[in-house]
Image: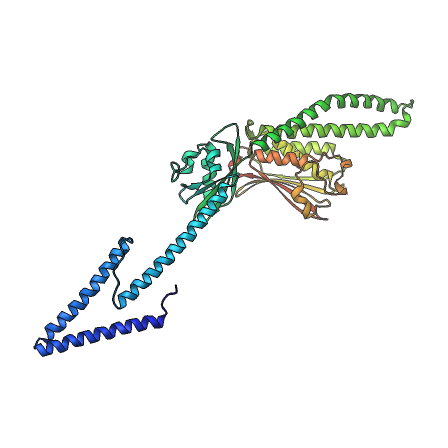
Amino acid sequence: MMNAPAGEVRRIWGLALVRLTLWMLACGVAGYLLGQTAWALLAGLSIYTAGHLLFAYQLHRWLAKPRIEPREGVGVWQEIYTELYRLKQRNRRRKRRLKDIVAEFQASTEALPDGAVVIDGRGRIVWFNQAAAVMLALRAGQDNGQRIVNLLRHPRFAEFMAAAAVDGTMGELEIPAPANEEHTVLLRIVPYGDGQRLLVARDVSDQKRLESTRRDFVANASHELRTPLTVLRGYLEIMHEEAGQGGALDSWQRPIGEMSAQSQRMGRIIDSLLRLARLESEGLQQRQESVDVPAMIQNVVDDLRRHDGRAHDIVVDAQAGLYLYGRASELESIVSNLAANAARYSPAGTTIEIRWQAEADGAVLAVTDYGPGIEAEHIPRLTERFYRVDAGRKASDGGTGLGLAIVKHSLEHHEGELVVDSTPGRGSTFTARFPYRRLIFDDAA
C-alpha cells in the first residue's frame, strides 16, 4: 500500500485542528453559561490531552510488544495507526524477501564443492557451509562467532589473515587440512563490504598428487636417460676424433659433429629438467644462508665472458655489501640464466647491463639486453617449459627452453617475482624483485 500523499496529510491535520477549535469553543460556551469559563477551558484541554496520552500509551505498548494490538484510534491517531500498520506490513514483506535471498544463498553455497566461510571485520565466523565444516573441521553452531585464527592454528594462517586485512587484496595459502593432514587445502581470502572477508577453501590433494607424479616421472626419466646418453656421447667423441684424421669416417665429420652438439644439448636439457624437478620438490624447506650477491654476479659474468663468442660488452652495477638471505645455488641459477639468455639472444658486440640495487621495498636484479625484444603477447608465457617466442629464439641457438622456468621456481623460493619489460626492436629487461625482509646489509664490504 502507498503512503498517504502530502495533501492528504495536511487535510488530516487541518481537520484535527478544526476539531480542537470546536471542542475548546464548546467548552468555553458551556463555561460561560455556568459562569466558570476558565475552569471549563482547562477541563476541556485536560480531557483532550488525556485522550492523546491514552493513544500515545497504546502506541508505545504496541511498539514495545508488537503482539499486543492497539485499539482503534480516533481522528489523527487513526491515521497514525494506519500508517504504522502499512509500515509493519512492508517490513514483514521485506524480511520475507531477505530471508528467501539468504536461504537461496546458503542453499547455493551448500551445493559448492569448495568450502566458504563468511568472516566479519573482527575476524569472527559469521557463517560457513558444509564443505568448509568438513575440510576445516568447523562445528556448526559451536564455532559461529569464534575467531577463525583461534580455530585454524597453522603457523602461517594468522600471518595470512593479517596480511589480507592490511592489504585488502585477495591472497592464497596452502596448508594441511585440519580435518586430515594428509590432504592439502588451498585457502583464498576475498575482501568485501566494510572489512568483511570470504574465506574459500579448496581441496587440492589430487592436484598435488598429480604434480608429484609428474615431477617424479620427469626426474626418473631424466635420470635414466643420463646413462645411455653418456655412452652415446662417448662413442661420438671417439668417432669425431677419428673423423678428423683422414680415415674412413672423414666424410662423416660434419654429421658426427652435429650429433655431438645435439647430444650435448640433450645433456643440458636433462640437467635442467633434474634441477627443475629438484626445485619443485624441495619447496621452501631448503637450508638458506647469507649470500654475497655482488661477488656471485661477478663470478657469473667472468665465466660468461670466457665462454662468450660474441664479444658482448657486459656492464655490472652491483651495490657493494648488499647481501640476500637465500640459497646460493638457486640465486646463482637466477643470475646465470638471465645473463646467459641476454648473451644468447643479443647481437654480437652489443651491451648487456646487469644491475643489483636496493630499493624502498626490496632489491632488484635487472638484466638488460639490446636484442630483438619480445612481443607483448608472449611475455606472460615466457616462464613456461620449452616455450619458444619465434624463429629468433629457436632450439638451434643452444637454449634448453627451461631457463626461465628455473628462474621462476627459484624466485618463488625467495618470495620474489620476475618482471619482464620488452620493446620489439629495442631490447628487453628481465627484473627479479626480492622483498626487503630478505636483504642483509654488510657495512664492512
Position in image of residue 380 (x %, y %):
65, 43
Vertical placement of residue 69 versus 391, above or below: below
Q: Nearer the viewer, residue 214 or 263?
A: 214
Instruction: Check the picture and name the quadrant holding the N terminus.
Output: bottom left
- The quarter holding residue 123 reads top left
Q: Nearer the viewer, residue 43 or 158?
A: 43
Instruction: Check the picture and name the quadrant holding the C terminus.
Output: top right
State left or right for residue 171 relative to residue 31.
Answer: right
- The quarter holding residue 92 reads bottom left
Position in image of residue 159 (x %, y %):
46, 37
Position in image of residue 405 (x %, y %):
65, 35
Which residue is painted at 15% across and 71% down in the image? Answer: 44
Which residue is painted at 33% across and 60% down in the image? Answer: 85
- The quarter holding residue 307 reads top right
Which residue is painted at 27% across and 73% down in the image? Answer: 15
Residue 388 visible from this viewpoint: yes
Residue 292 visible from this viewpoint: no
